[in-house]
Structures are given as structure tokens and as C-alpha cells.
Image (cartoon, rainbow, N blue to C red):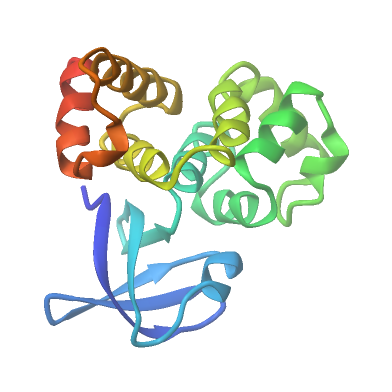
Amino acid sequence: MISLINGTVRSISLDKAIVEVGGVGLSLSITQKTSSQLNIGVPAQFFTTLIVREDALTLYGFLDGADRALFELVQTVSGIGPKVALSIVSALSPSQLAVAVTQEDISAIEKVPGIGRKGAQRLILELKGKLSDFGSASKISHHQPIWREQLTSALVSLGFSAKDSDSAISQVVGALAEDGVDAQTLDLSDLLKRALSQGGR
């Protein structure tokens, strides 16, 4: 499974980007929001999902780990495939969808192209209670220092939920504070190792 790529953006359209990684150009399916944030010739990191079909291998790329997690989660709803999932991620942020599902706001979800009223009702029914992490994590992340956001993204890309990664980071910060060490003075790689051992992975 290809879950993270770092490379130089070589081509951008509204729904695709070609990223050069080690001399090979990878074609990524992206949202228009992602497309607007990219620049040709500039390095970028993508959280990716590889979807295998009989007739195609499609790599979907996101600049944010939460968007990738949301893309994967909404596909667990019956009747939602990658194309509609990409539309959902493009139209709603993880926290917006979490709020819409919690409040059973059908009209907010049915505005997404390809969903419709029945699809929105099914999505609310099947995702109820599964999006709480997104709602809380994205509210907190606006007030987090950049190192903590990067560490959260790294943990999420390694399979942690937003809640588990937040808990592991908090334990690391607490343990370091007891030793009189400020977490932000350490390397990200060192913090990641400590968080992984806290998370029991």
C-alpha cells in the first residue's frame, strides 16, 4: 500500500497532478482544493490511498492526513465509491461533515455532487458516531503548534486515529515535562519514536 509520497509537482489540472518521485512520474487523483494549493516545480508531500480495480490502479492524493482518513471512511458507507468520496472531501472538511452527521443535516450533505437525498440519509445513518474524532481534532488543531500538527499527521498516516495520536502525543509531552524538557526543542523524528512507543505500536 502506498500511503505517503514526497516529490516534485510536474503537472497540475483540476482533478489530477503528476508528481515526480525518484525519476518516476506518479499520477494522483486530487480535489480542486488540493489543485489550487499546488505549484509546478515545487516539492509537496501527499497522504495517498491506492485503489485497485480490475481495469485500473488509481492513486488518490491529499495534502492533509485528515482528508485522506475521511476519504477512506466515507467509502465504508454502502453505495459510495472513490469518485463520490472525492466529491465529499472536496465539498466538506472533516469537521463540517462531522457536524452535519451529528446534527443529521441532510441538506448540507445532499449538496455534494453524486450524493442525493437517499445517499445523504444513508451516510448519516452509517457514519453516526464514527466522525467524533474529526470534529474534536480539527477544532483543536487550529490552536496547536506546527510541530504537533506535523506529528499528528505522521501518526495518522501510520494508522493511528486522530484521538489515539492526540493521546499518545499528550503522554509524550507530559513525560518530557516531568523531566523538565520542552517537547518543541526535540526533533520531530525523536518525538515520533516516543509517540509510537506510547501508542504501543
Q: Is residue 115 left or right of residue 21?
A: right
Q: How many marks?
A: 0
In this orientation, which residue lies closer to the viewer: 195 or 162?
Answer: 195
* Rendered position, 14 above or below 83: below
Q: In terms of image quadrants, where is residue 172?
A: top left
Q: Residue furthest front?
A: 180
Q: Is residue 142 left or right of residue 125?
A: left
Q: In terms of image quadrants, where is residue 109?
A: top right
Q: Residue at x 21, y 39 (%)?
A: 186
In this orientation, which residue lies closer to the viewer: 21 or 122?
Answer: 21
* Rendered position, 3 above or below 197: below
Q: Residue at x 55, y 56 (%)?
A: 83
Q: Position of residue 180 (x, y in %)?
A: 24, 20
Q: Position of residue 177 (x, y in %)?
A: 29, 18
* Rendered position, 86 above or below 196: below
Q: Position of residue 16 (x, y in %)?
A: 46, 75
Q: Residue at x 25, y 36 (%)?
A: 158
In this orientation, which residue lies closer to the viewer: 158 or 123?
Answer: 158
Q: In terms of image quadrants, where is residue 91?
A: bottom right
In this orientation, which residue lies closer to the viewer: 160 or 104?
Answer: 160
* Rendered position, 130 above or below 26: above
Q: Position of residue 131 (x, y in %)?
A: 59, 25
Q: Is residue 145 left or right of residue 194?
A: right
Q: Quadrant of the C terminus?
A: top left
Q: Residue at x 30, y 56 (%)?
A: 54
